[in-house]
Image (tube, rainbow, N blue to C red):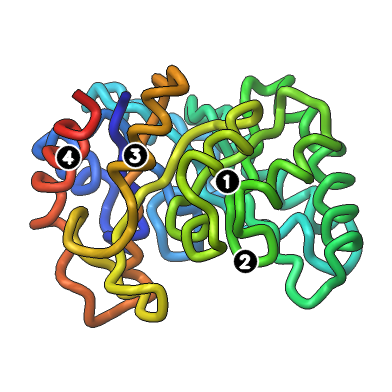
Amino acid sequence: MKLAFSTLGVPGLALDAVLKLANDNGFQGVELRAREGEPVTAALDASERAKVVEQFAAAELVPLTIAAYSRVAAPGDDEPVLEDVRAHVRLAADLGASYVRVFPGGGELLREQADNNAARRLAAVAPFAAEHGVRVLLETHDSHSRAADAARVLARVGYEGAGIIWDLMHTWRGGEQPADSFAACAPYLGYVQVKDIASYEDTTPLALGDGVLPIGECVDALASGGYQGWLCWEYEAAWYPHAAPYPPLLGEAAQYLRELTM
């Protein structure tokens, strides 16, 4: 399996510094958080996008994902959501990233209504994404936190341009065992996000192996299923200002994941 990390752990850090962290600590790819204030967003012009491509090529690293904040199950009109996703698909294609991450965001909607929104919107953007060589991946998160929830939506989409990001924390907190999560999302799986937290109630990010999440069971399920894709470490320092600094943890995280995947 190949290793990446999310820039969620180093919010606002210059891209050159992010790429140096990846190279210095043995990661092959980077999940790029695309939000205002970050070095890579959909607002980049053509010359800025070309510069990002050059930086990744020089570092011999992969821009794995554009992590957008579109919410495909949310209430409201479709077009603003679809245009936001399309803008990030264009960005991913220009940078050579394989994926665009989206959230469900179904909130307090009834399950059927949230599913309908997500399936309809993903079906609308999936052909566009496929034409650009990109997949739009629904993360197991918020209203669709279990793999079974995300898979229920993807089963209705039916396009290769859409898929799932399995975020281990959310499926575990949703009551799923790793083997069950993998079985549910395997037909649609783009890649896997791993992290560690203090407890079910306290989701403060910790170094991998220092918390309660069943990371080993997750990797075992992936290996048993023949998965050879990406493992991405997501350390949510952006939301937890008192969390331990992220950069010093990167080398240990890469080593921890390499040992699990051997």
Q: Is residue 175 left or right of residue 50?
A: right
Q: Which residue is mark 1?
A: 101
Q: For the residue carrying disc 4, how many other residues have a C-alpha within 10 Å: few (<14), some (14-19), or many (20+)?
A: many
Can you tell which mark lies on residue 30?
A: 3
Question: Against 133, is 121 above or below?
Answer: below
Question: Against 234, is 93 above or below?
Answer: above
Can you tell which mark lies on residue 14?
A: none
Within the image, what quadrant is residue 183 found in? top right
Name the image quarter holding the C terminus: top left
Q: Nearer the viewer, mark 1 or mark 4?
A: 4
Can you tell which mark lies on residue 254?
A: 4
Q: Is residue 145 left or right of residue 41?
A: right
CB contact under 8 Å: marks 3 and 1: no
Q: Is residue 226 left or right of residue 85?
A: left
Q: Which residue is mark 2?
A: 142
Q: For the residue carrying disc 2, how many other residues have a C-alpha within 10 Å: few (<14), some (14-19), or many (20+)?
A: some
| Residue type of the residue flagged with mark 3 | Val
Choose between 164 and 152: the one closer to the eye: 152
Q: Is residue 9 left or right of residue 80?
A: left
Q: For the residue carrying disc 3, how many other residues have a C-alpha within 10 Å: few (<14), some (14-19), or many (20+)?
A: many
CB contact under 8 Å: marks 2 and 3: no
CB contact under 8 Å: marks 4 and 2: no
Q: Residue 169 location, x and y as percent?
A: 43, 58
| Residue type of the residue flagged with mark 4 | Ala
